[in-house]
Image (spheres, coloured by chain):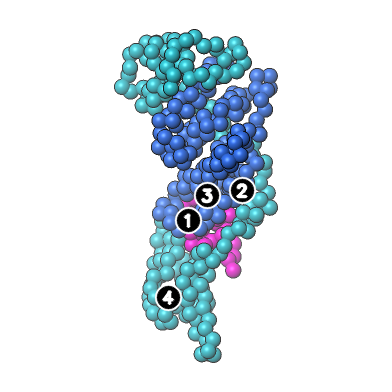
Amino acid sequence: MAEHPVVSLDEAEDATLADRAADGDMRSFEVLVRRYGPLMRATATRILGGSAESDDVVQDAFVVAWQQLDRLDDGAAVRGWIMRIVSNKSVDRLRARREHADIDDHDPVAPVDHSPDRVAETRSQEEALSSALSELPEPQRQCWVLKEIAGYSYEEIAEQLDLPTSTVRGLLARARKALTREMEAWR
Amino acid sequence: MKRSKKPITPASATGAADYSGDEPEGLDGHTIEELNDYLDDDRTPARESIDNSPGCQIALAALERLRGLTLTLLDRDVLAEPARDDTWVSSILENLSREVHAGRDIPIRHDDTAARLTITEGAVRGLIRSAGDGVHGVVMGRCRLEGAVTELGEPVTVNVDAAVIWGHPLPDAADRVRRAVQAELRRHTELNLAAIDVTIHDVHAPRAGGTG
């Protein structure tokens, strides 16, 4: 039905795209998928500590976004809104993992992405940070990523991970200490 | 949390991070958490016992570098993401249902009185968008049909937002959008148009680099 606009949608602002997508314009939604899909996938991979489930999580997040876009009052805020959806979807997986682990009495799934040979193979400080993160105990890693990368508050992390806020503070403190110590070691 | 002050082995010496929960040495009674809060507060109000402690200054510098790296870490992750081809995009779009945004059913008169023809509100919004997008320099935004569209002949007001690319005269653009939308709706629907209100909500330069 729709003919191509004279102005490419690729050039449209987030607010325009979000408004149109909320009205059911799938081509505008597609531009948002292309614009933010990689960032969403990277964030999901960070929260999950590996990329195995990232595509599924991003997929789920876009389905929710499509369904709920008409509830977003300010289209210009679509980036933060959609990032929060993908973060919450990622945390759902973390919780499912934990419940699974409780039942099976196994340790949480080990991170799969990052090489443990951090000292010899370090090529950049970001990679060093990435390795240091993957070596943190899983609860510390999760709290740190949710706080520093996903931008959750202490209270939100506590709620999402079903932990007391004091525990979240303690885990974050430990993660910060370990990572800071690593930072000093790389100088 | 443990707060004992027993000496710890530096990570650099063992090659492994220490997760014992002990504070690093030399923070003059402060903790990493306190220092992190101090950074959150932009080091105000200034705290002399931190500012005058060489150990704290080193730890603050490390915390700041950690923050900087955290910002660039995700940027690097995004750059390292495998190129996402059309298959990836279409696999996402395939899961979306158009019915979610179908809206109300708008009746269309038909010679056969037994037949009931309708067009969805979503489809009408699509027609409106498409008509407006055809106007040079215009990208349509949100679109609202106000009135009892489910009843034939009831007056309906169309409310549309549009963005205009910088350099195109606004009154002219709004007027052309109005005419294009009106012509399209007359051609395809029987809506009793009371008004077509066009709001130019944005004037912007073309985005550099497309999907970037």
Q: Residues within 10 Å of mark 1 (few under 14, many from 20)?
A: many
As for residue A107 lying within the magenta part, the answer is no
Q: Identify the mark at residue A56; answer none if there is no mark.
A: 2
Note whether residue B188 is visible. yes
Colour applied to chain A: blue
> Above or below — where is A74 with respect to A46?
below
Which residue occupies 53% across, 20% down? Answer: B19
- Give the left or right position of residue A119, taking residue A77 as reference: right
Quarter that holds the C terminus of chain A: top right
> Above or below — where is B2 with respect to B93?
above
Can you identify the residue that label 3 sits on?
Answer: B206
Which is in the foreground here, disc 3 or disc 2? Answer: 2
Quarter that holds the N terminus of chain A: bottom right
Which residue occupies 47% across, 68% down? Answer: B103
Residue B72 x, y percent position in the rendering: 55, 31
Which residue occupies 43% across, 14% down? Answer: B4
- Give the left or right position of residue A107, taking residue B21 as reference: right
Residue type at the position of mark 4: Val
Do the residues bearing badges 1 and 2 touch, measured as CB atoms within 8 Å?
A: no
Q: Which residues are magenta?
A: A1-30
- Badge 3 and badge 2 both on one subunit: no
Can you identify the residue that label 1 sits on?
Answer: A69
Do the residues bearing badges 2 and 4 touch, measured as CB atoms within 8 Å?
A: no
Can you identify the residue that label 4 sits on?
Answer: B149
Do the residues bearing badges 1 and 3 touch, measured as CB atoms within 8 Å?
A: no
Which residue occupies 48% across, 70% down? Answer: B121
Chain shaded cyan:
B
Disc 3 or 4, which lies upstream in sequence?
Answer: 4
Residue type at the position of mark 3: Pro
Callout 2 secondary element: helix
